[in-house]
Amino acid sequence: MSYPLDLEVIFRWWKISLRSEYRSAKPGETKETHEDFLEKSHLQVQIALVFGSKILDYVFNLCEGKFDFLERLSDSLLLNIISYLDLEDIARLSQTSRRFAKLCMSEELWEQIVRSSCDHITPDMRALAQDLGWRRMYFTNKLQLQRHLRKRKQRQGSQRKQSALDAHVPAAGK
């Protein structure tokens, strides 16, 4: 099923005033075809004044048939797509916009990348990722990861021993 595209720019406005002579004023409307909008400046000026230059540029692009479909995709779908890119491409993509910079640095992306590059993620690795972050864990070499895991286990072992000692020490004054 195909849907017809609107090929008009429609600008509507309302007068809002406490004055009695404007209370019965009806909304105004101007319609222009995309071609007429691109050629005539009066509506362009109104859009720039009310909405700013970024919206005017956006409307120009729409009238010229330039759509940014990536902008409409959800973050979760973009993260899934980005996870298949090479590291160099992820680095380049992160420089294109604030949104992509945020997505390319997100823990969710790096967790997906680590999961896809590892056969099995142990509970110790997951806990280490919570401490270090998935991105840092990905870029840390295997020897360093083994050292981090060993230190983490030693800390947990000493905490357990301390907890066991605390449980067996009688309270003072009893």
Image (cartoon, helix red, strand yellow):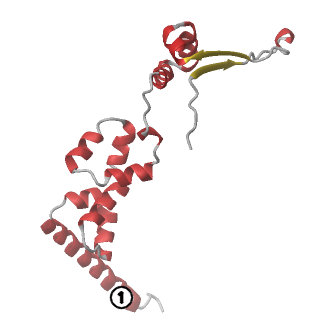
Q: Residue at x 62, y 20 (%)?
A: 10
| Residue found at the far front of this picture | 1
Decide which of 54, 142 is in the foreground and name it.
54
Q: Is residue 120 above or below residue 76?
A: below
Q: Is residue 160 above or below residue 35?
A: below
Q: Residue at x 29, y 68 (%)?
A: 128
Q: Position of residue 133 (x, y in %)?
A: 31, 59
Q: Residues within 10 Å of mark 1 (few under 14, many from 20)?
A: few
Q: Residue at x 21, y 69 (%)?
A: 148
Amino acid type, label 1: Ala
Decide which of 32, 167 is in the foreground and name it.
32
Image side of residue 56 versus residue 164, left or right: right
| Residue found at the far left of this picture | 143
Q: Is residue 29 above or below residue 144?
A: above
Q: Which residue is mark 1?
A: 164
Query: Could you say which quadrant of the image residue 3 lies in?
Result: top right
Q: Residue at x 74, y 15 (%)?
A: 15
Q: Position of residue 81 (x, y in %)?
A: 35, 51
Image side of residue 165 versus residue 77, left or right: left
- Secondary structure of the residue carrying tag 1 is helix
Q: Position of residue 174 (x, y in %)?
A: 48, 92
Query: Could you say which quadrant of the image residue 100 lies in?
Result: top left
Q: Position of residue 159 (x, y in %)?
A: 32, 79
Decide which of 146, 42 is in the foreground and name it.
42
Q: Quadrant of the N terminus?
A: top right
Query: Could you say which quadrant of the image residue 68 lies in?
Result: top left
The mark tally for this picture is 1
